[in-house]
Amino acid sequence: MKLLILTQYYPPEIGAPQNRLHELAVRLKAKGVNVEVLTAMPNYPTMEIDSRYSSGKIKAEVIDGVQVFRSRIYVSKSKSIIHRLLNYFSFVWTSYWRGRKLENYDYLMVESPPLFLGYSAMRLSKKLKAKLIFNVSDLWPESAEKIGVVNNKVFLNLAYKLEAKCYRNATIVTCQTKGIVDNIRERFPSTKTHWLPNGVDLDFYNPQKIKANGFRKKNNLSESDIVFFYGGILGHAQGLQVVLEAAKIVNKNEDVKIILQGAGPEREMLMELNEELNLSNVLFLPPVAKNEMPGILKEVDVALVPLRKLDIFQGAIPSKIFEALAMKKALLLGVDGEARHHFIDKARAGLFFEPENSIDLAKNIIELANNRAQIAEMGERARAYVQTNFNRDNISKDFLEILNNN
């Protein structure tokens, strides 16, 4: 069996889709599937082509046994919608012309968002005689509309039509959460769907094997500090202002430290707000490579995961949850719906706070800071739950069965 994964985002970039798709590719490869990847020159999240690739000489490489083909992409640090569209559509164009030179495949699996890559995927699937798998990790354009990132009605109408066309042309639509599955089934009842959740490599994120890497010492954190850690994109969807507002409320508790690690479109605004609030308990750190994350998580106490209070996020499960729980970290979750059901109600792996409610968040920060034994108990339950329900090995095995039966 031959599978081509088409995605704008892939290692050595860091991020949720990059890790998820690569981990799936490696596991399918180990199970005998001939997996190859067609992707862009790495540039995310800095929006600069990685210096190792800037000459354009690396057009193909092998990463962990997986053959990776690369095509050019337009990148700009500008946040304007024009430059963002140029970024997306440049890869739509170059990926098609790069991909049409490849051999035929049994399946072509495309990652959305960006939804526009569906244009390239539909044409390539015909050219390469491959069945199309449309992998939805975020309901786009619905989420972009509800967040307020996209407001143009003509553009939204075109995007919704593209979304429907992609689903109609797909042999199967794979969905990262059950909420996405339910949404697509309700709107497109004839579309065949499969829940393909994110998960975790339990061996890579194993607290018994990972040693502390000096993260606390490097960042002037004492052993007595209770460290609440957010690691990921500093974007519109996360609503991270609530974290800074809560930090202001708990600022007198000297043992509480809050870390925001990552990059994204809201980083500058958040740092300005942090300065405006005159916070001494919040630390901003740059993103790091995947191999550094287990050592960092080893030294923090609580994983902090917020999202904005929008109905669209009722079915969201941020990927950063899985790694933290595998490392036996308690969860402070500001995501209602599916994530709350799994990790708070069923796993009892942390506390829930109402999204965008800084008072509720501050109350839960204080509760955990005053009960370290509770943090440890939550951590034990956290790893046990993801080990049973979100093991990447089991997820890839189930997906392979789907491929074999279509």
Image (spheres, helix red, strand yellow):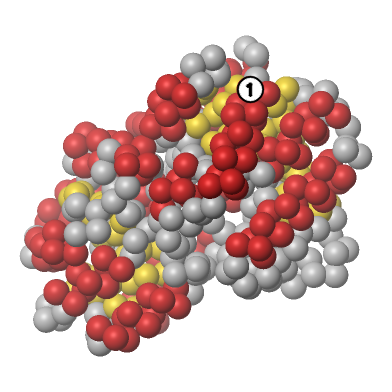
Considering the image in quadrants, where does the N terminus appear? top right
Q: Residue furthest front?
A: 154
Q: Which residue lies at the image location 21% right of the left edge and 42% below the top edge? A: 344
Q: Is residue 396 above or below residue 225?
A: above
Dot 1 lies on which element? helix
Q: Is residue 164 above or below residue 62?
A: above
Q: Is residue 120 above or below residue 146?
A: above
Q: In the rendered image, which quarter is residue 162 located in?
A: top right
Residue 96 placement (x, y as % from top left): 82, 43
Mark 1 lies on residue: 168
Q: Which residue lies at the image location 86% right of the left edge and 29% below the top edge? A: 127
Q: Residue furthest right?
A: 101
Q: Is residue 13 left or right of residue 205?
A: right
Label 1: how many Cα within 10 Å (few below 14, some 14–19, many 20+): some
- Near-viewer residue (366 or 279): 279
Q: Is residue 123 left or right of residue 381?
A: right
Q: Which residue lies at the image location 86% right of the left edge and 46% below the top edge? A: 98
Q: Is residue 274 visible?
A: yes
Q: In the rendered image, which quarter is residue 339 located in?
A: top left
- Near-viewer residue (380 or 159): 159
Residue 176 placement (x, y as % from top left): 48, 36
Tell me the kind of residue under disc 1: Arg
Residue 58 placement (x, y as % from top left): 84, 60
Q: Is residue 77 above or below residue 43?
A: below
Q: Which residue lies at the image location 64% right of the left edge and 30% below the top edge? A: 166
Q: Residue furthest top?
A: 405
How many marks on residues? 1
Q: Is residue 20 visible?
A: no
Q: Is residue 112 left or right of residue 314?
A: right
Considering the image in quadrants, where does the C terminus appear? top right
Residue 103 placement (x, y as % from top left): 88, 32
